[in-house]
Amino acid sequence: MAPPKLPLKAGDDYTVLALTIPPSTAYPRAATHCMYVRAHAPKIPSADSARSLFAVNVPVDATEGALRALFAEQLGGARIERVDIEREGGGKSARKQGAATGTVSRKRKRGGDEEGADGDGLPLPRTWERELLRSGGGAVLVFVDRASAEAALKEVVRAARKRREVVWKGEGALGVERYRTHQTLTFPARHELQARINRYLAHFATTESARAKALARQRSVPDADGFVTVTRGGRAGPARLDEAQAAADKLKQRHRAPEDFYRFQTREKKKESAEKLKRDFIEDRKRVERMRARRGKTLVSAVPVD
């Protein structure tokens, strides 16, 4: 199906390239998306400006791989060296989508979640399969040489003039499948979470150990002027766990209420002590009698002492 009749040029020498978006489960009919392309002419030229094209209103699911395939398969076969896609917030970065690399930026992604590396450099789990661009975003396509960029621009103009159908092939799923994947990634498996926790704790322990060693060296090594750097923590190391526990038990024993505070408590305690001595005496006497019986000696009866 040929794209609808559109103006060839728009704005500051932009060529209007009509992209046909195939039907999907979300929208059963083909749609037309207009992408505006021109030679890259920034206010401050760089070494790559002469071999670059600037595109505006790229599809929201545009990736470096999708743009490479677009020019390689349908727009003359020009080779692209890299793609700098404008990200939300005004910055630009070269992206390679399609496979989750695990390292993502701190920028807020489309959909409201924020992914990124934590302060110690370990990646956080991804909750979206890939990033979508904001509507009307731009991209700088850097080709391998100036001739390739010029040939690609001529092919864009030729496709727009002849109203040739250029089909956009995005990477990854959209619509319901995208949100199903998001739901799955939001609740990762238990073993994956445990592995991330273990890696973080190991990294944290290593970092803390290195930091403590660095502080210890600073406490003992004077600087060029002969002064010792004042750092956090004292010269003595922290108390061991058993010493701290012993001090806590001693303090608890000191604050405990006395058991013989009243007179009747003292009498009961003495009575229990006397009964214990009597029981121990009887047990000792029986043990001695058993030993003598085994040796074949005559048993001597004894009168218990009250």
Image (cartoon, rainbow, N blue to C red):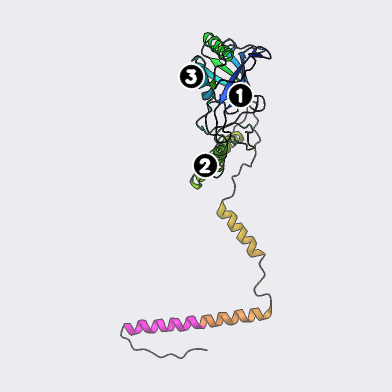
Please name the amino acid that badge 1 sits on.
Answer: His
- Residue 58 at least partly seen: no
Q: Residue at x 55, y 17 (%)?
A: 164
Residue 33 tag number: 1
Please name the amino acid that badge 3 sits on.
Answer: Glu
Q: Earlier in the sequence, mark 2 or mark 1?
A: 1
Please name the amino acid that badge 2 sits on.
Answer: Arg
Residue 62: where, in percent of width, then height? 57, 26
Magenta-drawn segment: 278-306
Residue 134: where, in percent of width, then height? 64, 28
- Spatial CA distance of label 3 from label 1 is 18 Å
Residue 291 colored in magenta in the image: yes
Front residue (pair 214, 275): 214
**What SS does tag 2 mark?**
helix
The mark lying in front, picked from 2 and 1, is 1
Residue 73 tag number: 3
Query: Which residue bears the numbered disc 2?
Result: 196
In the displayed structure, would residue 57 be above or below residue 232? above
**What SS does tag 3 mark?**
helix
